[in-house]
Image (cartoon, coloured by chain):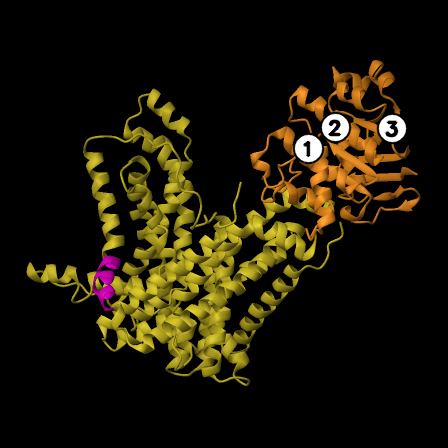
Amino acid sequence: MSLTLESILIRQGEFALAADLTLPAGGRFAVIGASGSGKSTLLSLIGGFLAPEAGRVLWSGRDITALPPGQRPVSTLFQSHNLFPHLTVAQNVGMGLRADLRLDAAQKARVTASLAEVGLEGMEARRPAALSGGQQSRVALARVLLRDRDILLLDEPFSALGPALKSEMLALLARIAERTGATVLMVTHDPADARAFAPETLLVEAGRVHPPQPTAALLDNPPPGLRAYLG
Amino acid sequence: MAARLQLGHLVAAFLAAGILGTLAAVAWFAGGLGGLTEWDWRAVRFTLWQAALSATLSALLAVPVARALARRRFRGRGLLVTLLGAPFILPVIVAIMGLIAIFGRNGALNEGLRALGLPEIGIYGWQGVILAHVFFNLPLSVRLILQGWQAIPAERFRLAASLGFAPRDIARHLERPMLREVLPGVWLAVFLVCLTSFTVALALGGGPRATTVELAIYQAFRFDFDLGRAATLGLVQIALCIGALLAARWIAVPAGFGAGMDTAHAPPAPAGWRRWADVVVITAAAAFLLLPLSAVIASGLPRIAQLPAEVWDAAWRSVIMAVISALLSMAACLALALTVARSGARWVETAGMAPLIASPLVLGTGLFILLRGIASPQQMALPVTVAINAAMALPFGLRALIPAARTLQADYGRLAASLDLRGWARLRHLTLPRLARPLGFAGGLAAALAMGDLGVITLFATDQPTLPLKLYQLMNSYRMADAAAASVLLMALSFALFWAFDRGGRLEPDP
């Protein structure tokens, strides 16, 4: 099993991004590059929010380029707006099982269990506004756990959290990735996150997504463009 | 993603076809402009003249009121500002009853003038039309200009204070530039409203010197039964509306109702004679707005219980029609707004705004032409009224819903898509809860407007009058006591419908 981006070309006005690479299943990859280099565009492509001008996206040999986002083997955590504010915690998580929220008793029990898994027992009836930022991230992760998709995309979902909370979330994320066996792509601005979480890194630079390379080596000896960005 | 055909596309196509088809029927039936008499051309001139004069008076009189409200803080100010929004959903015919109570032959003003031995003033004729238009549009203008005042950043006023500006310096450097920007839009907004004025002209105008084009359509249709001339006048009315809307493309017309009104800061409040002038201005404006309605309420409220059964029948009929109209309007509004937000299709938005180019009486004439082989006027009256009222409320509803639907799509569109939240589940768990407020507001506006509307129904002879029509008939047969009581009932029902829909939208908790 693997995620393949086959001769992908994306064009948005002046901006263009090319990718041609294969990621083995179960790997954890950081996505690093300067602002505007196309990191989020890459995630939008895999998530199904953006159609490429040319090329195909394949999961285990199956062409998923034309599938709508919700039918792809993908879960996405966005930078913000990961929860519906008018729904309770349990409903937000339950949507990971059935979008119409018609859950039977067994499914409801799974919702409760996944909330316990991320450390939110007893919070089912709360609304997101009544939770802290870290707790909100946990709710979103509980939903990821329930959806149990093959690919997990993270577009800096923890960037608004403080350093201690963030490393806590990364640890939880690592545990969930291990449990679900998902292939994880995480966009990050922070080299420390990349080192801590992802053995390998995709560098997005000069309109191209580079094939994965060992994170530590890349960050120890960055190419000039990345060096300027990291400072 | 590929643009899919959505419900909103169908609604927009239906609306565009309905309105354009109706206008086409009017155009097909219209004789040449040669068919118009000298009387008709007078109506065209009067329409433009009264709309221009009403707009000018409303805009100019609103400036001191808005300035006084912007810089003074007093008990009841918030209530007064809220009340300034009320005329929008106040039935026109009720306001006319109020104005007659104060300015009519036996009104308080003329009683006073007679007691002093001064000549009386008349409310019937062009001056009554202007008076009623100013009554309705002065509050609207005050709200719009007040928004302009509150949009001046507090820092500017602080800077002015630190530089030791006198009131005239503030006026010159801060207030007049703002007014130059805001007033043209205000003027045009009022002008547009007055351009299609029907009820006011019907009740207070008429005759060679105070007939609007809308009223002329009604007379040609109803009294002369000259469909060709009615249609020709309809074309003239469409041309006037399109002309004004084209002008509106150059001048930004502000949205009149519902925008957030109050900010914490107040511009500096000068003392001395300016303080007293502000007191006088605010008192006069409040009296002008409240006295007519208070007079109607005082005379009508005690008699509501004695209203004859036919009035209650009309009231019940009107409520049902208003609710159907509002539900239709809300459904269409929602479908259009969601499609605009998702696909960004300009033509869908334009179709939703299309009712602006067609006045109710023009649409009524067109529908009559189209349907007369199929249904009798009697059968047409109520359904046509419901449909036209639903359509006429669309532009107002869309103004509230489109921005909200865009925000919804921008904030939660991707999350919903990633969870495969579609169709009914999306409507139930995402769209309706998130859009409940603007949707309830749009429904409230539509219901209140439909409840109070006395327009297209007058075209059709019917033994099933709506409450506004019943009220008009009572006025015409000089049953003024019953008319006052029916006015109070109509006003109460209009406000209650608005409240019920708007409140319904607020039941949803919004964290």
Q: Are marks 1 and 2 in contact (CB under 8 Å)?
A: yes
Residue for point 40% across, 29% down: B154
A196 vs B339, left or right, is: right
Task: Decide: few, some or many residues near mark 3? Use Cα within 10 Å; few <14, some 14-19, many ≥20.
Answer: some
Whether residue B301 appears in magenta in the rendering, the answer is yes
User: Alpha carbon of mark 1 to alpha carbon of mark 2: how far?
Assistant: 8 Å
Name the residue type under label 1. Arg
Q: Nearer the viewer, residue B312 or B379?
A: B312
Residue for point 41% across, 83% down: B225
Residue occupied by mark 3: A210
Residue for point 93% across, 44% down: A61
Give the numbered dot on residue A138. 1
**Spot occupied by residue B289 in the image (x, y as percentages of width and height):** 27, 53
Chain letter matching colour orange: A
- When asked about the image quadrant of residue B418, the answer is top right
Instruction: Identify the secondary structure beneath mark 2.
Output: helix
Whether residue B252 appears in magenta in the rendering, the answer is no
Instruction: Identify the secondary structure beneath mark 3.
Output: loop
| Quadrant of the snapshot with the N terminus of chain A | top right
Q: Is residue B205 visible?
A: no
Q: Are marks 3 and 1 in contact (CB under 8 Å)?
A: no
* Mark 3 belongs to chain: A
Q: Which residues are magenta?
A: B292-303
Give the numbered dot on residue A194. none
User: Alpha carbon of mark 3 to alpha carbon of mark 1: how far?
Assistant: 31 Å
Colour in which chain B is drawn: yellow
B353 in relation to B185, above or below: below
**Spot occupied by residue B365 in the image (x, y as percentages of width and height):** 47, 75
Instruction: Identify the secondary structure beneath mark 1.
Output: helix
A111 vs B379, left or right, is: right
- When asked about the image quadrant of residue B466, the answer is bottom left
Residue for point 64% across, 21% down: A162
